[in-house]
Image (spheres, rainbow, N blue to C red):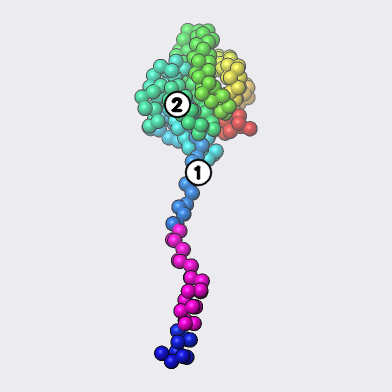
Amino acid sequence: MPRFALVVALLTALAACTSTPSAPDPAPVPESSAPPAEEKQVHLSLGDSYATGYAPGGKGTSFAQLVAEDAGLDLVNLACDGATSADLAAKPACGPAANGKTQLDAAVETLQTGKVSLVTLVIGGNDLTPCALAQDPVECATRTVAGIQTNVAGVLTELRAAAPDVKIVGLTYPDVFLGAWVNPSFPNGQNLARLSVTMFQDFNTRIAAQYDKFGVRFADVTDATGGFGALTELTQDPKYGQIPGPVAKVCSLTYFCDRTDVHPTPEGHRAIADAVTAALR
């Protein structure tokens, strides 16, 4: 081989041995998946048909749904139409999350997930309803409220054991019996309407005290819906003419005046939801 060609060959071989090898192509990095959406907190609803949204002609949007929507929470609604305070721990809950358990047992199970930020409880109305037709409505209500207090205390004891710090709001009801003032189904309607004010004052005072023992906030729905206004102050109602202001208000917020149905109208559910929100402030 000529000398010049030999030198070139040696230099080429040397360069091949001493040059820095090129870095291998980096291994492909798997595409990172998007982080899972943060799971919403839950509004846990317990109680009766006020919470389910029952109304003449079918269910509508309940105050419980409105509260959940307003707060940006998912709703777990265990309430049942017709439930009494004793039923909370004795009868199967309603709704898809019940799984055959009572409202109390299903509520405790839900609270133990740690995802509940609000509990609402509306109960006692079905316990009290028969007192409207009792010979002595006030005496009947006094006796009945004692049982409601005992049942509610049992439920709250277990809820607090499951979640000591969760926010709980206990509710009352509009004084629907004020509607007896104009409802022809009640021949002594004005007398019942007057007596109902005393009934609801007693119920609210005693149930609020029970809630307070467990650190539960109280939404006085009776007051928020005008139930304690003066019956001597009249207003012009488009259907019933000159009637007391509290009567006119309960006629617009419930179906009692013309249908003898104790359930709230859509406007009534909105008023109740607002009362719950106010109690949380």
Q: Earlier in the sequence, mark 2 or mark 1?
A: 1
Query: Residue 96 lies in what quarter of the image?
Result: top left
Residue in front for this viewpoint, 236 or 201: 201
**Image spot of residue 270 (x, y percent):** 53, 35
Magenta segment: 10-29
Residue in view at x 45 percent, y 89 percent:
5
Q: Badge 1 is on which residue?
A: 38
Quarter of the image for the N terminus: give it.
bottom left
Q: Rounded to the nearest whole Å, what is the CA distance between mark 2 and mark 1?
A: 21 Å
**Amino acid under disc 1:** Glu
Residue at x 47%, y 46% (from the top left corner):
36
Say few, some or many: other residues with alpha carbon within 10 Å of mark 2 (under 14 / 14 to 19 / 20 or more): some
Three-letter amino acid code at the position of disc 2: Glu
**Residue 125 lies in magenta, yes or no?**
no
Image location of residue 79, percent across then percent down: 43, 26
Q: How many marks?
A: 2
Residue 146 versus residue 44 in the image, above or below: above
Q: Position of residue 97 (x, y in %)?
A: 40, 30
Q: SS class of the residue under badge 1?
A: loop
In the rendered image, which quarter contains the C terminus? top right
Q: Is residue 17 magenta?
A: yes
Residue 246's disc number:
none
Q: Nearer the viewer, residue 32 or 38?
A: 32
Query: Looking at the image, which residue sits at the far left?
Result: 100
User: Residue under circle 2?
Assistant: 109
Of residue 16 and residue 79, the one placed in the foreground of this image is: 16
Quick one: label 1, few (<14), some, or many (20+) residues within 10 Å?
A: few
Contact between labelled residues 1 and 2, with CB atoms less than 8 Å apart: no
Q: Position of residue 17 (x, y in %)?
A: 48, 74
Q: Does 95 sit above or below residue 85? A: below
